[in-house]
Image (spheres, rainbow, N blue to C red):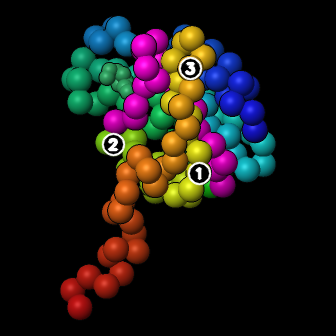
């Protein structure tokens, strides 16, 4: 999956952001291993903490459609340096995406830096960590 296609889709999704409180619109595009793309934007709330980021919107849309095999995620915002995902999104990425999966951080000028799920959240808490609980 080329990053150019993901960037284009994420930019289109970003236009749908509901961000009246921060005025900071973000778009994301998640590629499945089968070649589909699920997009997302940030959706804010008057109760600020209920805000859902673009990355989580894209992941939740895909998972709720039955997708579980992901290949790449791109996130874009109008920033000088490419936008960096928040901690909540990193934890959700760690739940559904392989550690080595590329995550592309982009800005509107098309500047893209590449990282991975594991680099964004090293030593993430995973379901396996509960297996030996209480022993
Ligand atoms: O990677 C990021 C960083 C921030 N936001 C959103 C959350 C909130 O709506 C706004 C300001 O934090 O940007 C995202 O969607 N993704
Ligand atoms: Zn986030």
Does label 1 point to a residue whose CB lies under 8 Å from ligand 1? Answer: no
The magenta stretch spans residue 73: yes
Residue 133 coordinates in the image, percent (x, y): 26, 82
The residue indicated by pointer 3 is 111
The label shown at residue 88 is 2
Judge from the rendering whether residue 133 lies leftward or rightward of residue 116; answer left or right: left
Q: Distance of mark 1 from mark 3, alpha carbons?
A: 19 Å
Residue 130 coordinates in the image, percent (x, y): 32, 75
Q: Residues within 10 Å of mark 1 (few under 14, many from 20)?
A: some
Q: Which residues are magenta?
A: 69-86
**Which quarter of the rendered picture does the N terminus lie within?**
top right
Judge from the rendering whether residue 48 lies leftward or rightward of residue 38; answer left or right: left
Q: Residues within 10 Å of mark 2 (few under 14, many from 20)?
A: few
Residue at the (28%, 30%) spot, across then down: 50
Does label 2 point to a residue whose CB lies under 8 Å from ligand 2? Answer: yes
Is residue 66 in view?
A: no
Q: Report the mark closest to the observer, 3 or 2.
A: 3
Seen from the viewer's position, the closer of residues 130 and 102 is 102
Residue at the (33%, 42%) spot, across then down: 88
The residue indicated by pointer 1 is 101
């Amino acid at each position: 999956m080329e990053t150019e296609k993901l960037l284009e889709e994420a930019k289109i999704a970003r236009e749908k952001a509901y961000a009246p409180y921060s005025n900071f619109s973000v778009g994301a595009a998640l590629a499945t291993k089968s070649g589909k793309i699920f997009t997302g934007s940030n959706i804010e709330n008057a109760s600020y903490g209920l805000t859902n980021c673009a990355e989580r919107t894209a992941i939740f849309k895909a998972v709720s459609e039955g997708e579980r095999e992901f290949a790449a995620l791109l996130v874009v915002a109008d920033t000088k340096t490419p936008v960096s995902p928040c901690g909540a999104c990193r934890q959700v990425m760690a739940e559904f995406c392989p550690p080595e999966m590329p995550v592309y951080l982009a800005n509107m000028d098309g500047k893209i830096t590449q990282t991975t799920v594991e680099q964004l959240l090293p030593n993430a808490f995973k379901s396996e960590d509960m297996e030996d609980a209480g022993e």
